[in-house]
Image: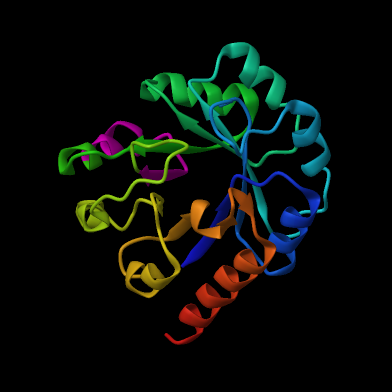
Amino acid sequence: MQTKVCGLSTAEQVKTCIKYSANFCGFILNYKKSHRFINYLIAEQLTKINKKNTAYVGVLVDPTVEELKTFSNLDFDYFQIYGDFNADQIAEIKSKYNKKIIMALQIKEEQDVLKYKTYKDVADIILFDSSGLHRSLSWNYKWIKVVPTSITKMLAGNISMDMLKNLKEITNIVDLSGALETDKVKDVIKIKNFLNKVELINDQN
């Protein structure tokens, strides 16, 4: 099981993720409603940190062409995209900006999981997330069991540390944000504990 820490905003947070081998670091680029939002200059500074084996993910909600163009200049490996895009549009974004794609699906009902079929041939990873965006909402993660193992699955939405062991069987990647915060600020101790715990879970099997 791989790990993503999302909503990073300081060099210390990013360096902690890299030191403890997070697979993905996520940055909120254009969604100002989120307390995790960072502006372009901060994103530029943070993505200049030597990421070693960690992938940098630019998180975009309903991105405009101008936003895609602007953020494609930074050292992101992936664009994580929320919004009403069809498969052709996602394929065009992927090709034009030379970024891998995490397509984020917001899950309210069990049938929402099936939206993955639209993007399965163009997205590199499908993120199954809650409908809350900046609000951490829970949903029934077991719904994604219907998704074929050929699809690389990322899971988010109010995931807590004590859930991690049970999630290994249903997802390839766990994406945590709120659970790693203290007073709405990423806590480097919580980040370290999360990454160490997943490593321990992986070592047990």
Colour basis: rainbow
Hey, which residue is sitting farthest bottom in the picture? 204
- Image point 60% across, 59% down: which residue? 23
x then y, percent, for residue 133 = 43, 35
| Image quadrant where residue 87 sits | top left
Compare residues 28 and 113 and report the one nearer the observer: 28
Is-magenta flag for residue 144?
Answer: no
x then y, percent, for residue 88 = 41, 20
Identify whether 167 is placed above or below 126. below
Magenta residue span: 114-129
Identify whether 163 is placed above or below 158. below
The C terminus appears in which quarter of the rendering?
bottom left
Identify whether 148 is placed above or below 188. above
Compare residues 61 and 124 and report the one nearer the observer: 61
- Image point 47% across, 37% down: which residue? 134
- Image point 65% across, 42% down: which residue? 77
- Image point 69% across, 27% down: which residue? 72
x then y, percent, for residue 22 = 62, 62
Compare residues 97 and 162 and report the one nearer the observer: 162
Is-magenta flag for residue 126?
Answer: yes
Identify whether 89 is placed above or below 131. above
| Image quadrant where residue 47 sits | top right
Q: Is residue 151 left or right of residue 190?
A: left
| Image quadrant where residue 199 sits | bottom right
